[in-house]
């Protein structure tokens, strides 16, 4: 589904990603962990197409297509979804209008029938119920005045409605209490399927107790320095990122 | 003689004829008021950009156009006006080219004791009340257009809410201009008197049906007595060649509340003035405004809030969206008088510029002569928020659609504050259509 090959990216003068290699197959859940500043969020946003980052080298294939050639909205229409670490407030436009516009943009792109207002409301209410959200949220401005937990839940809600092929969760767990975390994780788990891939970017192992990954990668200094199965996450929890110090040094020496 | 001087003489002559024609049917005090105003207009002349109040707005196009007084139009059908009727349940006064049209109006449901009528008819029924109030708030000492309006007072809305009465149905004043052959002017004059412990909601709409140059020069006086609540809303949707100059003058008494929401959506040259005097303690005043201009439209908003007494609050938010070569002006003054302690005044003007050639002159002003007050003001001018644009696009929304949505969102902050559902929907439809978002 997703193949990242020797990806280098920079923001202004600083090189942040320095040769990321990652392959994610359909049906898999990958966790990307790493210390602060290691490039986790940058990787997530490079996948979504944020223009603040410049890809200087490497390629990304998504379902065999060159992702880097695609516009931001094209990527979403192809099935890439990023759940933001810091969802953006857009006062003045209701969640309802926003999400319906998104869903219909994607459907139009795929040559599918547009969703009527009624169909959309039914779909939205169904997903909101699953996530324990109050449906009055639909008429509020996008993330406007939402608490941190509401914002994160709203990201997962959007994901549940848009049904992406590749979902990237950027620190979706940060700032959530345990109840909210469980609800969010249930939402994500309900999306797990054989034709969908999920990348969970997180600083903490806690989320991975609820969303159990198939593979865990450690990103440090802009590269994946170690990969393993879910036990790697437990090991990291126990020993901290000092665990990968050796690999980091090796990588730096190579560089 | 320069063109505008010639025009002032011409208008004065027209005015003298107008007064003579109406004199036999007019109480002497009103003839006097008209004549005085006409003289003041002739003395003042049209404003120029050398005057501070008009620095950013050149009215040469008005000063040099030979407008004649708009005549009664051929009858309009209900179908013609139906797109502008906000809600059939509202009380409604319809004026076509400044003349009242009873057949299109709806006042039967006016509550007992209250008056919702045209000024011309009310002059016969309530002469003393009108004499006491008309021209008392809208000082035309130094205001050319208000003087011009007073000189040509003939009709407009008269609303009187006697003590203790709540007018639950909103009152819609619909002013329609139909002229298109030669330039005409109408001078609607509205008088709204809300006595103690009353409540009323008034919406003024101004629409143009045809192309062609015309001038609407409106004055609205609003007296808000002790403990009264008046919500005022204005939809300005003049046609593309229309000029719209309007002043709303408000005086609030103790513990009263007044809100206004002004939507400036049409017209070639627009000047909208709101003056509110908080004349006793405990008043709250909310001013909201939205102006949207494109092409070479010019929209000028001038507001003034006088905090004359202690313990009053005012909140003001004006937003503008300017595209193409449009020009916007915001000139908002908050004047805190020496004894107006504990004043809480907030003012903000936010502008979205959608093109490199659009221009905004924004001038927020605080003049504070009391020492224990809380006052803030500010202006922001910017483009579409790139972070929000990215967020929307990352959900699959194309860049064009995302931009339209964000413009809509910016504008909708003012519209969504409206309590009146029919008006809110009317504005939302306008905004959605303007941004080609109707399928939402």
Image: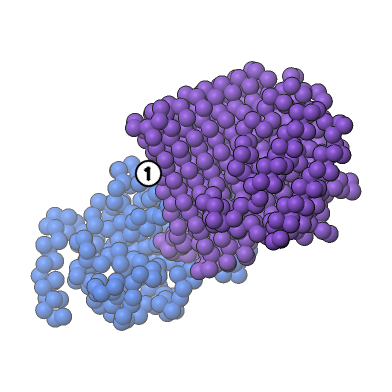
Chain colours: A blue, B purple
Residue A207 versus residue B384: which sits nearer the camera?
Answer: B384
Residue A141 showing in the rendered view: no
In the picture, measured across the screen, residue B78 lies left or right of residue A116, that is right
Q: Residue placed at 76% from the left, 41% from the top? A: B152
Residue A166 showing in the rendered view: yes
Residue B170 versus residue B64: which sits nearer the camera?
Answer: B64
On screen, residue B68 above or below A37: above
Q: Position of residue A203 (x, y in %)?
A: 24, 57
Q: Residue placed at 37% from the left, 77% from the top? A: A60
Q: Position of residue B63 (x, y in %)?
A: 69, 56
Q: Position of residue B364 (x, y in %)?
A: 45, 48
Residue A8 versus residue B239: which sits nearer the camera?
Answer: B239
Callout 1: SS: loop
Q: The residue marked by circle 1 belongs to what chain?
A: A
In the rendered image, which residue does mark 1 sit on? A147
In the picture, measured across the screen, residue B214 lies left or right of residue A163, that is right
């Amino acid at each position: 589904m997703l193949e990242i090959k020797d990806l280098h990216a920079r923001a202004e003068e600083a090189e942040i990603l320095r040769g990321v290699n990652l392959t994610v197959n359909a049906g898999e859940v990958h966790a990307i962990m790493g210390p602060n500043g290691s490039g986790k969020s940058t990787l997530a946003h490079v996948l979504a197409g944020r223009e603040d980052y410049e890809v200087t080298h490497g390629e990304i294939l998504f379902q065999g297509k060159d992702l880097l050639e695609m516009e931001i909205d094209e990527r979403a229409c192809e099935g890439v979804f990023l759940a933001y670490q810091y969802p953006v407030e857009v006062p003045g436009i209701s969640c309802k209008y926003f999400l319906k516009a998104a869903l219909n943009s994607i459907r139009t792109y795929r040559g599918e029938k547009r969703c009527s207002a009624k169909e959309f409301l039914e779909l939205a209410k169904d997903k909101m119920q699953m996530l324990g959200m109050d449906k009055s949220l639909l008429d509020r401005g996008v993330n406007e005045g939402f608490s941190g937990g509401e914002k994160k839940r709203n990201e997962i809600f959007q994901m549940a409605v848009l049904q992406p092929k590749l979902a990237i969760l950027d620190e979706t767990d940060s700032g959530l209490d345990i109840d909210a975390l469980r609800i969010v994780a249930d939402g994500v788990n309900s999306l797990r399927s054989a034709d969908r891939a999920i990348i969970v970017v997180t600083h903490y192992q806690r989320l991975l107790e609820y969303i159990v990954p198939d593979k865990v990668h450690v990103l440090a200094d802009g590269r994946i320095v170690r990969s393993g199965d879910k036990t790697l996450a437990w090991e990291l929890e126990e020993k901290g990122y000092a665990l990968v110090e050796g690999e980091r040094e090796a990588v730096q020496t190579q560089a | 003689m320069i063109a505008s001087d010639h025009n002032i003489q011409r208008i004065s002559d027209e005015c003298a004829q107008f007064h003579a024609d109406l004199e036999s049917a007019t109480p002497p005090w009103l003839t006097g008021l008209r004549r005085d105003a006409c003289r003041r207009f002739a003395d003042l002349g049209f404003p120029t950009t050398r005057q501070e109040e008009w620095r950013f707005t050149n009215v040469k196009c008005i000063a040099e156009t030979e407008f004649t007084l708009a005549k009664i139009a051929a009858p309009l059908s209900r179908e013609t006006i139906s797109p502008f009727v906000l809600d059939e349940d509202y009380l409604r006064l319809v004026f076509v080219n400044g003349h009242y049209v009873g057949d299109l109006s709806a006042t039967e449901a006016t509550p007992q004791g209250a008056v919702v009528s045209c000024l011309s008819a009310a002059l016969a029924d309530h002469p003393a009340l009108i004499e006491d109030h008309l021209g008392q708030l809208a000082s035309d000492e130094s205001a050319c257009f208000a003087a011009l309006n007073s000189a040509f007072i003939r009709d407009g809305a008269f609303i009187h809410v006697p003590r203790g009465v709540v007018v639950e149905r909103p009152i819609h004043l619909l002013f329609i201009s139909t002229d298109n052959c030669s330039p005409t002017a109408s001078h609607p004059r509205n008088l709204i008197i809300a006595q103690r412990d009353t409540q009323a909601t008034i919406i003024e709409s101004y629409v143009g049906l045809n192309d062609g140059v015309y001038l609407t020069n409106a004055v609205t006086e609003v007296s808000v007595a002790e403990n009264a609540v008046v919500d005022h809303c204005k939809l300005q949707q003049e046609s593309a060649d229309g000029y719209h100059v309007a002043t709303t003058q408000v005086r609030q008494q103790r513990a009263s509340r007044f809100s206004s929401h002004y939507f400036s959506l049409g017209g070639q040259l627009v000047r909208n003035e709101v003056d509110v005097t908080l004349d006793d303690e405990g008043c709250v005043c909310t001013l909201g405004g939205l102006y949207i201009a494109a092409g070479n439209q010019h929209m000028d908003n001038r507001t003034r809030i006088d905090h004359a007494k202690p313990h009053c609050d005012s909140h003001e938010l004006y937003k503008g969206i300017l595209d193409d070569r449009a020009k916007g002006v915001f000139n908002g003054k908050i004047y805190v008088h020496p004894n107006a302690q504990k004043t809480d005044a907030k003012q903000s003007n936010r502008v979205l510029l959608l093109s490199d050639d659009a221009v905004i002159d924004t001038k927020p002003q605080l003049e504070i002569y009391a020492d224990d007050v809380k006052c803030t003001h500010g202006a922001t001018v910017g483009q579409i928020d790139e972070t929000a644009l990215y967020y929307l696009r990352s959900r699959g929304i194309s860049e064009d659609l995302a931009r339209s949505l964000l413009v809509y969102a910016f504008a909708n902050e003012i519209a969504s504050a409206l309590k009146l559902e029919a008006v809110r929907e009317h504005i939302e439809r306008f905004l959605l259509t303007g941004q080609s978002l109707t399928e939402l």
